[in-house]
Amino acid sequence: MIHPIPADSWRNLIEQIGLLYQEYRDKSTLQEIETRRKQDAEIQTNVDGSPGSGETPEEEQELEPEPASLPVRKALPQICLLSNPHSRFNLWQDLPEIRSSGVLDILQPEEIKLQEAMFELVTSEASYYKSLSLLVSHFVENERMRKILHPSEAHILFSNVLDVMAVSERFLLELERRMEENIVISDVCDIVHRYAANPFSVYITYVSNQTYQERTYKQLLGAQEGDRGPRGVRARLGATAGCSGPSDCPGTEQGRGGPPRAGRRGPNILKRVEEQSEREGTALDAHKELEMVVKACNEGVRKMSRTEQMISIQKKMEFKIKSVPIISHSRWLLKQGELQQMSGPKTSRTLRTKKLFREIYLFLFNDLLVICRQIPGDKYQVFDSAPRGLLRVEELEDQGQTLANVFILRLLENADDREATYMLKASSQSEMKRWMTSLAPNRRTKFVSFTSRLLDCPQVQCVHPYVAQQPDELTLDLADILNILEKTEDGWIFGERLHDQERGWFPSSMTEEILNPKIRSQNLKECFRVHKMDDPQRSQNKDRKKLGSRNRQ
């Protein structure tokens, strides 16, 4: 049954959204984490404290932790979408029009969940548009700002944000019109697919300038002359719009979001649609286009930052051997850092000397290893190198405290065209494993591939956001789900994020383990479903349908 809603009802709802996008995003993901926790706990134990499902095999029941051993998890705040803290319009089913229509008595529970997922996409877009409006009105078109910033600085800080706002406005209007057609939303993924295929490309330009935006903003805050000093710039870049710090100001969070936002909400819809249905096909197509835009955004950011990083590294290197060109469009840094090199043969006499180890510094690129020693003036003197494909690593067996965290690095062909062996000591177990994983990942690790994840793999969800500090680390967002591929005793995890298969190290303290195997299995099932878009059979069927449609025309 079609129950249209007056346009003003939806517009009033959108206008009432009191949260900026970053606040909305954080609160909604906290709610997602708490929901997952509750599901995990409910399945893990019954009311009487016994293990959850009777379907669990006896062998697995013995491995289940007792209720007393379950970690105590602090409750997270619930999302409050509207500016009125007493309002309950967090959900589609809480809207007055929905409550009074009686549709909740007709719809199946899964359809209600699907409606909520589509409604969340619309409200998150409205919140994002509100953030963009604030950025434009208080910063981009602010007369006081124009007096402070040089035109080139303003161009770097704000880039093409007006184009981004125009696309967001059109996108939101189309979503609103769809919602006005019927209180039961028919679909939104067709709109998402249409915008992701072309208009969303404006985000690639904006996000790709992130490195220059952040650098310019820091330079402005660090300036010391008059009104361009920290007090003057922060007062106008911050207090003008009630921002509390740099993360709330132009060039950083205020204009971010875009396709990564829709890309995060899209899979929630895909999980709820009926399998093998027309809506599933539309959702898969939309998700595929969004993934392409998100990857292009990420690659744009990486390309800019990598280029600057390679130039900086090249300037710091002095070659004791034949010079190796560092800067290349196809090269990027994987890991860098100091290790201890064992000097001399491994004998009892050597072990008694004070100079058993000496410092060396490694720069590991995706295709090259450069071995240096630090010299005065923040410089590095290069004394050896080798292609990454000709590296081999071997963990040294436990030989006491002196040789703890020591591993062997072999260069099958070094800068002098000969084989070289280095015995290296790391500062911790996790640092040793990280170096070994980075230096020769394909020969040392036996990680489960995406196509063979049928066995139960340990999983964690992110409960505290984490920003990568090293190239081999993984930046985590709240509610990310990751498979654990390797774990160290001193608190580091090497994991793979389910939604994009990105791998890297992160502190275990930023996550909590998903204890129940049924929840882990469900997460993998949803991941497989999202990645149906990579199924060659599906692509062939889709091409046949297109061809048949053309023939009929």
Image (tube, rainbow, N blue to C red):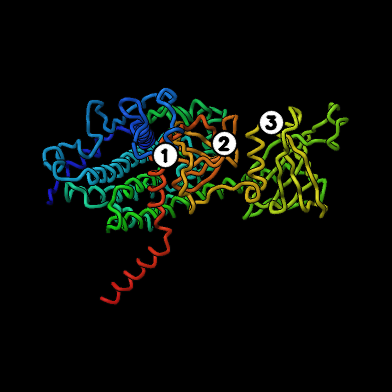
Say left or right for 31 vs 453. Answer: left
Lower position in the chain sequence, tag 2 or tag 3: 3
Q: Residue at x 86, y 27 (%)?
A: 353
Q: Could you tell me if residue 247 is visible in this image?
A: no
Which residue is labeled 3 in the image? Answer: 427
Name which residue type carries label 1.
Pro
Residue closer to the observer: 55 or 508: 55
Using residue 7 as the reference point, say whether residue 513 is left or right of it.
right
Q: At numbered mark 2, what does the secondary structure look like: helix, strand or loop?
A: strand
Q: Position of residue 217 (x, y in %)?
A: 51, 36
The amino acid beneath tag 3 is Ser
Question: Is 5 displayed left or right of 354 in the figure?
Answer: left
Disc number at residue 517?
1
Mark 3 and mark 1: Cα distance apart in space: 35 Å
- Disc 1 is placed on an element classified as helix
Who's the residue at 41% across and 48% down the image? 527
The residue identified by callout 2 is 487
Q: Amino acid at mark 2?
A: Lys
Residue at image position (26%, 26%) is 85
Q: Closer to us: mark 2 or mark 3?
A: 2
- Mark positioned earlier in the residue sequence (3 or 1): 3
N-terminal of the pair, mark 1 or mark 2, is: 2
Q: In the picture, which quadrant includes the C terminus?
A: bottom left
Against 18, residue 548 (above or below) is below
Foreground pick, 52 / 264: 52
